[in-house]
Image (spheres, rainbow, N blue to C red):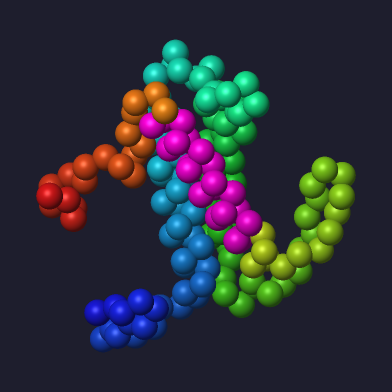
Amino acid sequence: MCYFLTCSSESAPKPNPITAAFKTRTLSAHRNIAQAFDSIPESRFLYGPTPAQLTFGYIAQHLVKDSFTFCENAFARLDDAKLAESTTMTFGGNTRTVTRAQMALGHALDIADHYSQLANYMRLINMLPPTALPRPAGRGGQ
């Protein structure tokens, strides 16, 4: 039973709870994004809410599904003991040193942001995003 952040459980602690949380949230977002793109009609891929915003198609190109596999493989090699290790990151021609935890958190937040973007766009064209659809019976749905 859980009360906010304090949970009681009869089972033994699972190894690598921090990286497991990153993996679970990120893989869930990957599935939601893939389901969203699979449900958007091809004719709507040029849609963007305003000229200043990205289109569905541009977001799809940015998140090509091969990148999900790359990230999933990277997460598979990560454990809690490695989160404090340093690595280098190059973005926009600038290289800096960051921890693996910063990279994992940054990726999880970026993916969540993209799913939110897609979900909002879908609602603007009268579509329900995957996380708003009714759950199938027998899987916590009604």
Give the farthest residue toward the top.
43
Q: Residue at x 81, y 50 (%)?
A: 90
Residue 132 appears at what percent x and percent y?
A: 30, 42
Residue 122 painted magenta: yes
Q: Residue at x 86, y 54 (%)?
A: 95
Q: Nearer the viewer, residue 61 or 124?
A: 124
Residue 138, visible in the rendered structure: yes
The prevailing secondary structure element of the residues shown in magenta is helix
93 on left or right of 71 = right
Residue 107 appears at what percent x and percent y?
A: 60, 53
Count of numbered circles on the image: 0
User: Which quadrant of the structure image shows residue 106?
Assistant: bottom right
Say which quadrant the N terminus sits in.
bottom left
Residue 135, compared with residue 140, is above or below; it is above
User: Which quadrant of the structure image shows residue 98?
Assistant: bottom right
Q: Residue at x 38, y 32 (%)?
A: 123
Residue 38, visible in the rendered structure: no
Residue 51, compared with residue 22, is above or below; it is above
Q: Nearer the viewer, residue 49 or 44?
A: 49
Q: Nearer the viewer, residue 120 or 28?
A: 120
Residue 7 painted magenta: no
Residue 39 appears at what percent x and percent y?
A: 36, 27
Residue 75 appears at what percent x and percent y?
A: 56, 59
In magenta, the rendered stretch is: 104-123
Q: Residue at x 40, y 42 (%)?
A: 32
